[in-house]
Image (cartoon, grey):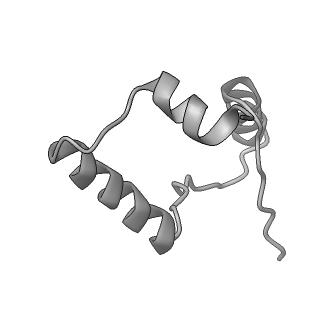
Amino acid sequence: MESILVHPENPEQLKTVKAVLRALKVQFEIVPEKLPAHVLAGIQVGIEQAKNGQTISLQEFKEKHLLKK
């Protein structure tokens, strides 16, 4: 038998899909999404920077990265 991987776009869709599967008595399992290792490493770097006080304000970020000079 084939398996189907479903990607709901919001909590309401997820709730509906689960309800339909239960109503049809289709077995399913919930598999939490996992972030790639490079994303987790980047998050850890950011956490360490914040702990060390290496932060900037939102305005400083905008001026540095978003606003054209």
Task: From this view, report whether residue 65 is shown above or below residue 41.
Answer: above
Q: 49 and 25: which one is in front?
A: 49
Q: Residue furthest front?
A: 69
Q: 26 and 68: which one is in front?
A: 68
Task: From this view, report whether residue 22 is shown above or below residue 57.
Answer: below
* Numbered circles on residues, count: 0
Quadrant of the rendered image containing residue 41: bottom left
Q: 65 and 9: which one is in front?
A: 65
| Image location of residue 39, percent across then percent down | 49, 63
Q: Residue furthest left?
A: 52
Q: Quadrant of the N terminus?
A: bottom right
| Image location of residue 8, percent across then percent down | 76, 41
Residue shown at 51%/62% (left/top)?
A: 34
- Residue 24 in the figure: left or right of residue 54: right
Q: Quadrant of the C terminus?
A: top right
Residue shown at 55%/52% (left/top)?
A: 30
Residue shown at 46%/73% (left/top)?
A: 37
Q: Residue furthest bottom?
A: 1
Q: 54 and 64: which one is in front?
A: 64
Quadrant of the rendered image containing residue 63: top right
| Image location of residue 27, percent across then percent down | 66, 55
| Image location of residue 9, percent across then percent down | 77, 37
- Residue 56 in the figure: left or right of residue 31: left
